[in-house]
Image (tube, rainbow, N blue to C red):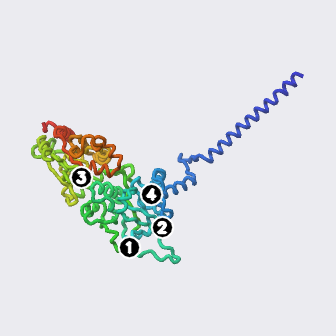
Amino acid sequence: MKSRSSARGGEPRRLRNVALLALMLCSLVALSIIRARFSPIASAGGEALKLKADESKLVVTTKQAVVNTESGDSADESAASTAAEAERKEEAEAKPGGGGDGSKPVCYETSRRSDTCEAAGDVRVVGSSQSIYVDTLDREWKTKPYCRKHDAFALSHVKEWTLRPFPSGDGGGAPPRCTTNSTATAFVLSTGGFTGNPFHDYTDVLIPAFITAHRFAGEVQFLVSSYKSWWMNKYIQIFQQMSRHDVVDVDADDEVRCYPSAVVGPEFHRELGVDPSKTPSGYSVLDFRKMLRGAFGLDRATATPSGDRWDIRRRPRLLIISRRPARGRAFMNERAMADMAASLGFDVRVGEPDASTDTSKFARLVNSCDVMVGVHGAGLTNMVFLPAGAVLVQVVPYGKLEWLARNTFAEPSAAMEIHYLEYAVQLDETTLSEHYPADHPVLRDPMAIHKQGWEALKTTYLDKQNVRPHLGRLKNTFLQALKLLPHDKETMN
């Protein structure tokens, strides 16, 4: 009786164990099915196969990165930028300069400041109506080809361009007939916006044009919208370095220009700079500066003396960027500054670039210099012509403007291989102290003026302020510049 009872008692335990084992096996099978459904499957090469659903989301997100002409809505920039960049790279690898398989235009956000569209196929440009007809399109795309996409004031001076599909055959008419043909890539950009200010000339137009056009190795034709003849005359040598074809004032053009591909809108990277990680072959702002030397016939690539030291025949040269007091940010003791610099052994030159300045001539002057000093402003953009190893001294006006100085000229200087020094104007060095009482917020609390917005800041601290640097403090800065120059320092003692 006892043995039978033990056998009957062990049988339920065995059944429970079998049930538990079966439950575990079922759980493992279920987990495997779930993982196979929701996780990427590893291929033989170890690469993950993308789900079709993910691919469709990528395409939709990318198209939302530019203005959709059907809805008129603009997608959120930060959400779309990563996906847009991923698709752009895939398209570029598939067909350089074109639209992947050639069946669609590639319209994508290249940065928070710029959108670019690319199309390949039968491309017909009608400049007088700012229209581009492409046989492979199935919808319209609109863009303003200027690198300040969120600046309403700048874009109010930039014409909108439309990429259109060919008219349909059923009563839609025919596409415009070609009157001239080219094997180059058409590149549409605008010289509207803030052009005329040298900083914006380079940051918004010239450097982005270089970034975008460099990969075509000269086989690109610039079709310039909002064309300004005086502006183009200043910079025509640069465009001639980037292209073997004539520059076209496209808005006034009566031709129907036909190309195998087109780019509409240049690509922006950073202020006065190029991000090599975003360029097809890793080219940088150093390549842009090399191109400038070729464009303007600049002799000096580096700030080195003849032989191994400076001598009486070739002293280090210092250029003071001058401004008229009425414009603001002028040196009120400019002559005394020049005399002090000469006493340190500098060959001092003074230059005041403006809209009428011969760009080639001034570029050669800057390139001949080893140190350039100026109050924060567009004139410091001429740093692009300085030889590598030269020194830029930026005088920052009173008013907590160090952030502005850093973004515009301090940060770009390193990538250009230019040494950077900063001289911050103190309260007793600004003419603002002559116009406001000591307890006025302009003098006592500059950040209160900043909070009033850009126009208040600009009017107060940039337009109405001139400076009178202490010669003793400035002398120390000039001595620092001398130590940074590539020469035998003992010759300057």
Circle 4 SS class: strand
Q: Residue at x 9, y 44 (%)?
A: 312
Marks 2 and 1, Cα distance to the nearest angstrom?
18 Å
Q: Residue at x 38, y 73 (%)?
A: 256
Quick check: marks 4 and 3 in contact, CB under 8 Å? Answer: no
Q: Residues within 10 Å of mark 2 (few under 14, many from 20)?
A: some
Q: Nearer the viewer, residue 163 or 442?
A: 442
For marks 4 and 2, give the one nearer the viewer. 4
Circle 1 SS class: strand
Disc 3 target residue:
379
Q: Amino acid at mark 3?
A: Gly
Disc 2 target residue:
136
Q: Residues within 10 Å of mark 3 (few under 14, many from 20)?
A: many
Is residue 127 placed above or below 332 in the rendered structure?
below
Disc 4 target residue:
108
Marks 4 and 3, Cα distance to the nearest angstrom?
33 Å
Marks 3 and 2, Cα distance to the nearest angstrom?
45 Å
For marks 3 and 2, give the one nearer the viewer. 3
Q: Position of residue 137 (x, y in %)?
A: 48, 67
Q: Position of residue 279 (x, y in %)?
A: 38, 52
Marks 3 and 1, Cα distance to the nearest angstrom?
40 Å
Q: Position of residue 296 (x, y in %)?
A: 22, 57
**Residue at the farthest right position:** 1
Q: Residues within 10 Å of mark 4 (few under 14, many from 20)?
A: many
Is residue 477 placed above or below 351 in the rendered structure?
above
Is residue 419 placed above or below 257 in the rendered structure?
above
User: Which one is earlier in the sequence, the residue at label 3 or at label 2?
Assistant: 2
Q: Residues within 10 Å of mark 1 (few under 14, many from 20)?
A: some
